Amino acid sequence: MAVLLLAEVNNGELSLDATAKAVNAAKALGDVTVLAAGGSAAAAGEAASKIEGVSKVLVAEDESLGHRLAESTAALIVSLADGYEHIVAPATTDAKNVMPRVAALLDVMVISDASGVVDGSTFERPIYAGNAIQTVKSNDAKKVVTLRTASFDAAGEGGSAPVETISVPASEGLSAWVEDKVAESDRPELTSAGVVVSGGRGVGSEEDFALIEKLADKLGAAVGASRAAVDSGYAPNDWQVGQTGKVVAPDLYVAVGISGAIQHLAGMKDSKVIVAINKDEEAPIFQVADFGLVADLFQAVPDLTEKLG
């Protein structure tokens, strides 16, 4: 069986972590061909060719594929679909925009956020905020799947797959780029960071969220937030971790002032080590934490930050 995997390409560069994890999952389905598409994608294609388990890399470069335009990318994938039984991608923001369009154009179902591969037709995915695992079997001739990267280890490097540049179908002009508004940060990207420090409603204000950021900077970590903190205006939307936010599985997750609602746990419970700081000893977060500190965060976090210095 052949698999076409849409690589995660941002501004011409390969998101290695997300793509390598998706490759590792897709290897169970058959020979993996990686598609690197974008306004500029040659460098991303070369990087993808070095991932272990990749059989071939297709590079598609065209202005219509730039700026994360989903319509043109979906049309490109459909034009290549005849040779593949599985069309997969990491379950990133971009792929969640592209893959349902691919499925609609092919008139098949989309299996989203798969956390396990049982066989070529059967996949596992979390439901009910991660409290249950649903097994889904598809009888479609082509399976369109997004893969939850937090559930898979990254494939190693050291491969040497051939790279082929392909032509791009003419754009139908269904969408056009107007502008990008990008938040710049020197911190690691939240979904691929090895360490994440998150704050919740207990932090109390946007100003006091600086405590979380200072601790994260000491640890070289990404900053996260609970939905309660985001809804209260303490942190921006793209920091939200949870069922309606981002799913993370870092080596270390530090939850500060977070009670531990099931919606938040769904986004971080696969973390290797979980540390919780909360003044409420009955907070649900302590049920999943490997290490818990019952303390006032306004005293504990500055003390910890100082000692790390």
Image (cartoon, rainbow, N blue to C red):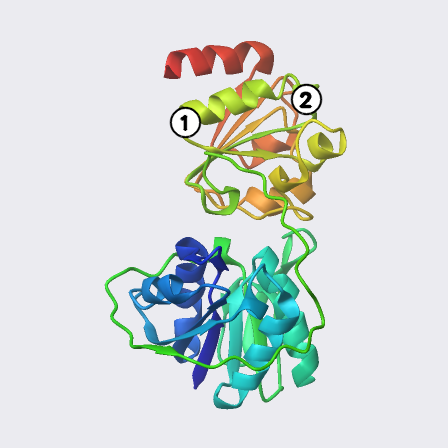
| Residue drawn at (39%, 61%) of the image | 20
Foreground: 79 or 188? 79
Q: CA distance from mark 1 to mark 2?
A: 21 Å
Q: Which label belongs to residue 206?
A: 2
Compared to residue 86, the image places residue 11 above or below, namely above
Disc 1 crowd, CA 10 A, few/some/many (<14, 14-19, 20+): some
| Residue drawn at (56%, 85%) of the image | 79
Residue 309: image location, x then y, percent: 37, 14
Residue 151: image location, x then y, percent: 48, 56
Residue 110: image location, x then y, percent: 65, 73
Give the SS element for disc 2: loop
Labels 1 and 2: the sequence-earlier one: 2
Compared to residue 271, the image places residue 130 above or below, namely below
Q: In screen coordinates, is 297 left or right of 3?
A: right
Of all residues shown, which one is farthest toward the right? 232
Q: Which label belongs to residue 219?
A: 1
Give amino acid for label 2. Answer: Glu
Give amino acid for label 1. Answer: Leu
